Image (spheres, rainbow, N blue to C red):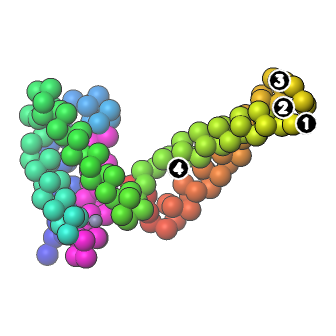
Amino acid sequence: MEKWSDKIFDQLEEKRSSIPKNDFRFLSIGRITLMAQKTEEFAESCPACQNNRQIIGEMIQSLPECLNSPGGRKSYEKKKNLIESHLSKVHHIRPAHYLYAFYTLLGLLAGFLAGLLLSFTVGKTWDRSFLLSGSTLGLLLGQAYGKYADKRNYKKNLQI
Ligand SMILES: [Zn+2]
């Protein structure tokens, strides 16, 4: 029997030509098929994913018409965000580059704060060079770790 997520994929492919290219990219509509695969994996043991399966089906059904009204567009984005956040919070599924962005920002902030602290303890005064080198170092470390974390997640099959 054909898998449900394969059907979703086929349905989206059929509609693809009637969806404006910019919308397709900007709303990352292609990701729905990946979300569908993961949702199907978890649906057996997770009631929320069972429910999300139905929502994903409706989202595909309503394309591309729902993109033409502001209300429909908003509700499409809202549904997609809810499903994404459920997959992320409960099943640790993260979009590609999510961890990179997260750790880069975290590294930058941590580096800035470390620079600030060093400036007043070691430097005894407000010293911009501490802030600059702290932020730069933090940024680089954050980027490196984020890249690694993204790759690790990908290997664990936890990426959409
Ligand atoms: Zn779930």
| Residue 32 part of the magenta-drawn span | yes
Distance Cα–Cα, label 4 vs label 1:
33 Å
Mark 3 Cα shell of 10 Å, populated few (<14), some (14-19), many (≥20): some
Q: Say above or below: 32 vs 22.
A: below
Closer-to-camera residue (112/12): 112
Residue contact between numbered discs 1 and 2, judged by CB atoms under 8 Å:
yes
* Proximity of marks 4 and 3: CB atoms separated by less than 8 Å: no
Image quarter of residue 114: top right
| Residue where numbered disc 2 is placed | 119
Residue 75, position as x, y percentages in the image = 17, 38
Task: Determine the CA span between mark 2 and mark 4.
Answer: 29 Å
Residue 126 numbered tag: 3
Residue highlighted by disc 4:
99
Kindly identify which residue carries mark 1. Answer: 122
What range is drawn magenta here? 28-46
Is there CB contact under 8 Å for labels 3 and 2?
yes
Position of the C terminus, as image quadrant, is bottom left
